[in-house]
Amino acid sequence: MSKLQWQPLEANPTVMTKYARSIGLSPDWSFCDVYSLDLLDMVPQPCCAFILLFPVTENYEKFRMEEKTLLESSPKPISNNAFYMKQTIGNACGTIGLIHSIANNRHRPGFVKEGSVLHSFFEATDKLSPDMRGKHLEGDESMCKAHETTANEGQSRTISADEKVDLHFVALVNIDGSVYELDGRKHSPIIHGKCTDDDFMIAAADVCRKFMERDPAETRFSIIGLSANSDY
């Protein structure tokens, strides 16, 4: 049986904001471009998540396998407050990155609207395993339709569901005072070190730099932040 495939999302903060709000993100929060890791003051604050788009290269895949072996032999304890889900749908990494970003900031007042698509999704999946959360997304018609609508928007050429894509989204969030990398293709969440809400962007930027340093010849990196609106 072939794996379920979605159309890829564009790394476009305007489109992602429209998408997130349509399924329940508070209008007080928006996605925005992070233009430079050296000019983080330009990013609207507070910023509670980064979504990194990066190329899946041979260097990266080699690193990912080495990382998996290391973590399986020396696992780190993962916070019970971490919401993590596996990617069981091809090309769904954009939506899963968005879900990871929002799910792990739900403690913020009014962050997700009650009765929304996201609110219902979180209620249905909070007690499920990461694998079952991924499976639940496959059958969630509201989430599937929202993704399909968003994937057809944006400024780039629309990519078909069966077209090979070598770009991938991951989310970076602060969970219980540590920077977590949440990637539905990985064995588990990855902890990258301590942070506070105040220095989250600095810590997340350091993680992004590591991705870039593994492939110094690549230019296909984009970072999107999830920030409060300026009048928040």
Image (spheres, rainbow, N blue to C red):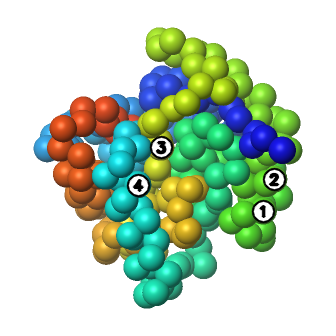
Nearer-N-terminus badge (4/3): 4
**Residue 144 appears left or right of 66:** right
Characterize the local packing of mark 4: few (<14), some (14-19) or many (20 or more) Cα atoms within 10 angstroms.
few
Q: Amino acid at mark 3?
A: Phe
Nearer-N-terminus badge (4/1): 4
Q: Say which element carries label 1.
A: helix
Residue that label 2 marks: 136
Residue that label 1 marks: 132
Residue that label 3 marks: 169
Q: Amino acid at mark 4?
A: Glu
**Residue 141 appears left or right of 111:** right
Identify whether 11 is placed above or below 117: above
Tell me, yes or no, if residue 227 can be seen here. Answer: no
Q: Is there CB contact under 8 Å for labels 1 and 2?
A: yes
Q: Say which element carries label 2.
A: helix
Nearer-N-terminus badge (1/3): 1
Q: Amino acid at mark 1?
A: Met
Q: CA distance from mark 2 to mark 4?
A: 27 Å
Q: CA distance from mark 4 to mark 1?
A: 25 Å
Q: CA distance from mark 1 to mark 2?
A: 6 Å
In the picture, which quadrant includes the C terminus?
A: top left
Nearer-N-terminus badge (2/3): 2
Residue at the location (53% across, 62% down)? 186
Identify whether 199 is placed above or below 68: above
Residue that label 4 marks: 61
